[in-house]
Amino acid sequence: MFRRIFLIALAASLAACAREPAGPESAPAVTFRFVHTTHDERFVARTSDPDLIARVRAELAKPLAERALHINGVIAKGSDANAPWSWHFVEKEWTLAEMSIELCDGWPGYIEENLDTWLADVGFFCPWASRVEIELQ
């Protein structure tokens, strides 16, 4: 009996989803430049997530000294417009954070010098001293 009710509910849900209009086209990606405040090194990250774009822009509306959120996300090999670095933040796999674990803290130059080891052992980067600096166009 439970299985039959579940299957009817599942079918109804799928039918409702099929009738809903498709969502809006994916938002264009926006690139933000971050600064690591203690090492004065810069890097970029892109996102097309409208909520994250709004959150980053809210940080940009504050004076740099009042920006408290740092980037936290998965990194991968390849510059992807993140020169001079040979790594980049994966577009849909980063956010802004108030706090992160120490394991992923570092600075861009350290990641560059230890990229293979960092990717194998950690896989993500959350530089506590990073702050969004500007939006690039």
Image: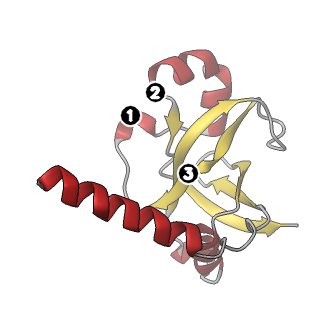
Find the distance from the CA under tag 3 to the CA under tag 1. Answer: 16 Å
Q: Which residue occupies the foreground of this view, 20 or 64?
A: 20
Pointers 2 and 1 in contact (CB under 8 A)? yes
Task: Identify the residue at image location x=73%, y=65%.
Answer: 26
Residue 9 on image: x %, y %? 30, 64
The N terminus lies in quadrant: bottom left
Task: Identify the residue at image location x=54%, y=16%.
Answer: 117
Q: Earlier in the sequence, mark 3 or mark 1?
A: 3
Task: Identify the residue at image location x=45%, y=62%.
Answer: 14
Q: Amino acid at mark 2?
A: Val
Pointers 3 and 1 in contact (CB under 8 A)? no
Color style of the picture: secondary structure
The residue carrying pointer 3 sits among few (fewer than 14), some (14 to 19) or many (20 or more) residues within 10 Å by Cα, namely many
Residue 10 on image: x %, y %? 34, 59
Q: Amino acid at mark 3?
A: Trp
- Which residue in the rendered view is the most extreme toward the left? 1
Q: Earlier in the sequence, mark 3 or mark 2?
A: 3
Residue corresponding to mark 3: 94
The C terminus lies in quadrant: bottom right
Q: In the drawing, what numbered circle is on residue 103?
A: 1
Q: Image quadrant of residue 84?
A: top right
The residue carrying pointer 1 sits among few (fewer than 14), some (14 to 19) or many (20 or more) residues within 10 Å by Cα, namely few
Q: Amino acid at mark 1?
A: Leu
Q: In the drawing, what numbered circle is on residue 122?
A: 2
In the image, is 73 to the left or to the right of 23? left
For label 3, the SS is: strand
Q: Tell me if residue 68 can be seen.
A: no
